[in-house]
Amino acid sequence: MTIPDSYLAYANRRYGMDHDRYDWSMLPQRKPVVWPNGARVALWVIPALEWFPLDMKGVPFKPPGAMQTAYPDLRHYTLRDYGNRVGIFRVMQALDRHGIRASVAVNAAVAARYPTLLQECTRRHWEVIANGQDMDHLHHAGLDPEVERKIISDTLALLRKASGQAVRGWLSPAKSESAATLDLLAAAGVDYVCDWVNDDMPYAMRTQSGALHALPHPVDIDDYTILVQNHHTEDDFRDQLCDQFDLLYKESETQGGRIMAVSLHPWVIGQPYRIKALEDALQHIMGHSGVWAATGSEILDAWSAGQS
């Protein structure tokens, strides 16, 4: 059978990317980044305050952490809620001990249901990142653009009012996006997104409303992936965070500044038998010179200043 010529016809066939959201770029060929005060690694800690509805629809798929059993799945619902009631405060204590200000990813539903919890975050001068409406409202191709626009607008309005912050960052629930998500976020005044996991450093993305930036928010090094999904031990989690940092720190000696992003779910790492793994990893990281504990917005601003 002969393949027709039309089979190979593809409008975006080119060297590099098959879309124009950003340019093809290899990290070793980019301009080295210089962090404030000559820091070698920017430490970016991102706890997530999530709300999983008890009657989740799971459209178009169930996000990580979703309800598992028949309604009402109180076993998993209450475990997720443990993070907002108990676990987050252990995370706060661990970060306070080292003077680390986090960028906390917050579902709008959490800010509405637990306003005092958000106040505990802002009292610590943590940055608030929008984490969508809740964990059952995913952004996807089947979502009407006007419906998605309203979800984004309502989420940002609630979080901006509740936090008193500009809310410059966005993490989509389950990192899921539609083709319109980036354009809608930029139009709503968002400066950076945490959904793309294809780099170690920030990079600019094109939208209909100008530039938006991607910041490296990895999924393979977070507590849920390592401890729940991969069934590794708490010692494994600690060691993997330390190994991640050690290599980035070594690279920074000759290749410019790096970012060590730590994604946390308080219902996972905030358990009494797990929190020490985080505390030990932070002790290792902060025991090195040239570590700059910063928020996502601070990292983006420092990176942007050095790109001109």
Image (spheres, helix red, strand yellow):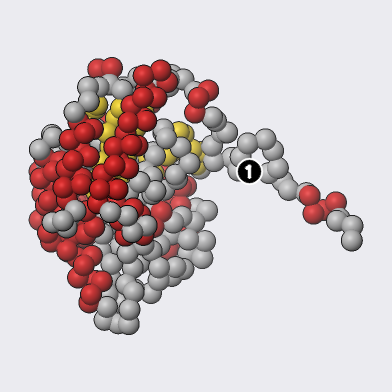
Judged left or right of residue 131, residue 60 is: right
Using the image, determine if residue 36 lies above or below residue 191.
Answer: above
Q: Pinpoint residue 199: horizontal percent, then vertical percent.
A: 46, 37
At x 39%, y 24%, the residue is 251
Q: Residues within 10 Å of mark 1 (few under 14, many from 20)?
A: some
Nearer-the-camera pick, 186 or 22? 22
At x 23%, y 65%, the residue is 80
Nearer-the-camera pick, 20 or 294? 294
User: Tag count in the figure?
Assistant: 1
Which residue in the structure is indicated by mark 1? Answer: 18
Q: Residue 297: name its quadrant.
A: top left
Q: Residue 153: name its quadrant.
A: bottom left
Mark 1: which amino acid? Asp
Q: Pinpoint residue 156: horizontal percent, then vertical percent.
A: 29, 52
Q: Quadrant of the C terminus?
A: top left
At x 13%, y 61%, the residue is 85
Extreme-right residue of the structure:
2
Nearer-the-camera pick, 75 or 37? 75
- Residue 65 visible here: yes
- Residue 148 visible here: no
| SS for dot 1 | loop
Q: Quadrant of the N terminus?
A: bottom right
Judged left or right of residue 208, residue 219 is: left
Q: Residue 278: name its quadrant.
A: top left
At x 17%, y 35%, the residue is 283
Q: Pinpoint residue 305: horizontal percent, then vertical percent.
A: 36, 22
Using the image, determine if residue 275 lies above or below residue 80.
Answer: above
